[in-house]
Amino acid sequence: MKNKTEANFRSFRIKMLLRIAGLVAAAAVTVYLLHSLLLRGHVANGMVWLLQNIGGMGYGDALAFYDRTFRRHMDTILLLSLFFVFLVLLHVYLRFFTRYFEAIDRGLETLLADTPGEISLPPELFTLERKLNLAKHTIERQKSDMQIAEQRKNDLIMYLAHDLKTPLASSISYLTLLRDEKQISKELREKYLLISLTKAERLEELINEFLEIAKYNLSNVTLSYHEINLTRLLEQLVYEFQPILAQKGLTCRLEIADDRMLYCDGDKLQRVFDNLLRNAVLYSYDKTELTIAAVADEETVTLRFVNHGDPIPEEKLDRLFEQFYRLDAGRGTEGAGLGLAIAKQIVTLHKGTIHVESKEGRTVFTVVLPLRPPRAL
């Protein structure tokens, strides 16, 4: 690209030099012709003829008038003629040169006015044209990013209001009943108090989730690397999920080598695996099998969380890792849509990748992590 830019500038300089040389040559030819006409007397004969036929003078009077008026001031007339020729050629040159500035000005107006389409300049200004178009595309991309950020901010307000209002309104309703109903039974009072406490705990969980996603969006989040036994971590995770699995008649099969070691931030990765397994349970058909498989090579370990359930539409797959996006808000799930967003943040911090595939009733979340930290810690 640098060589191409230098070639364009050389071409531009050469063309400018050629045009200047052409203007100088044109001025020299004009002066030469004028000087020749004066020396050969063609100008004198023409002036005398004009004085005779238009001015009505005789040949002698016309010749005397020409001699008195023009011949004695021939040097002045020649200098004035040369100056006039110079002004004309200078105007032509400047008109040619300033068209580049006019083209640049039109390009800048297009850039500032946000007019659709590419900016077009003369071929000699190809490098500047490319830079202006690059700036135009950058501005358009930043504008689009700002619009997306604004929309996400509005979504945050909407989700925050909705998710906090539901348990809060429920808790207030039951507490109001406890206050107003004086003759309420002990069993009903305990039931209302239990519901209010559950809703209050849900409020606390939501607030913690919002604080956590804000924390993971900060650039100064660091990982605490240490060596963990990945096999034991996943076995413990599956064991803890047994009561939840039993509610839907699910089983979970773990496929991993014995004592597979991994250098990572174990606490944060446990959050990732917990979230992926929780989602797998939530969206699985009843009485089906979940699979967690881990395969390692020399540098990475690949984990797959597989469940059987309704396939996820293609257009929704890319949005699963967006903040506050919920796959099916109508299913009554209480999540704030932050779990997968946080999971992606954690995996990215580990220099890993996470993606999802879903087809034919089978959904697979794949996480690829380096076995060792990306740099010495």
Image: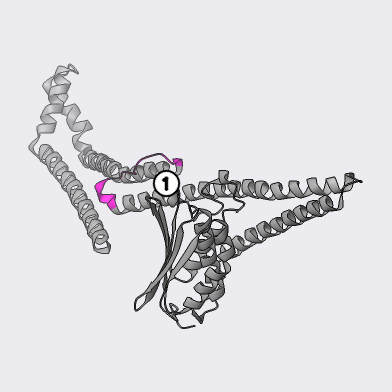
Place residue 79 in its image quadrant: top left
Question: Which residue is outermost to the right?
Answer: 182
Q: Is residue 61 visible?
A: no
Residue 258 position within the rendered picture, expressed as x and y whole percent measured from the top left: 43, 80
Is residue 186 shown above or below 251? above
How is colour applied across the structure in the image?
Answer: one colour
Q: Which residue is mark 1?
A: 313
In the depicted view, which residue is nearer to us: 205 or 24? Answer: 205
Image spot of residue 322 (x, y percent): 51, 54
- Name the one closer to the observer, 67 or 266: 266
The percent position of residue 306, horizontal first and vertical second, equals 43, 60
Residue 170 relative to residue 148: left or right? right
Instruction: From the viewer's perspective, tell me whether residue 226 is left or right of residue 260.
Output: right
Task: Give the number of marks.
Answer: 1
> Residue 232, relative to residue 316: is it above or below?
below
The range drawn in magenta is 113-126
**Position of residue 159 in the picture relative to residue 45 (left or right):** right
Identified by mark 1, the residue type is Pro
Furthest toward the top, the residue is: 56
Q: What residue is at 20 percent from the left and 39 percent from the top?
A: 74
